[in-house]
Amino acid sequence: MEINEYKKDDKYVINVKGDVDVYTMETLKASVTTALNSDTKQFLVDLEECSYIDSSGIGVLITALKQFTQKGGEFLLCDVSAPIMKIFKLSRLDQLFDFCTKKDLGLE
């Protein structure tokens, strides 16, 4: 898994490329912690190039959603790839998370 993080305006973006699983989730968790400690109001996880996510990766995202929401921020999943969206829909997590595109937010 490869992660690229950047801030633009009041947005903190984490781009995830590759597989998020029990072996790589700590890297994602560290990026989420960095984002939570920033002064941004919107936290975005770009899953366009994410090819696989298991329950441990989903757990990191659910925890991040809760923590960022408690902080008064907005948590969004961006450009979710079709295979990953299928996982979210099958597990009904598409009802928990808010989704967007980078284009919607002026990030392209």
Image (tube, rainbow, N blue to C red):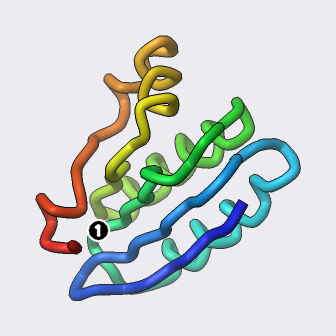
For the C terminus, the quadrant is: bottom left
Q: Horizontal placement of 25 versus 9: left or right? A: right
Give whichever of 7, 96 is nearer the camera: 7
Image x and y of residue 82, in percent? 41, 31
Give how far across and how far down residue 58 sits, in percent: 61, 37
Residue closest to the eye, 84 or 41: 84
**Left or right placement of residue 34 versus residue 44 in this view:** right
User: In the figure, 60 relative to 10: above or below?
Assistant: above
Q: Is residue 53 above or below residue 60?
A: above
Dividing the picture into quadrants, the one containing residue 85 is top left
Q: How many residues crowd mark 1 within 10 Å: few (<14), some (14–19), many (20+)?
A: many
- Identify the residue shown where x is 49% and y is 56%: 67
List the residue tagged with mark 1.
42
Is residue 39 depicted above or below 29 in this figure?
A: below
Question: Where in the figure is residue 19, as x and y percent of width and height?
Answer: 70, 47
Determine the residue positioned at 43% across, 51% down.
Answer: 48
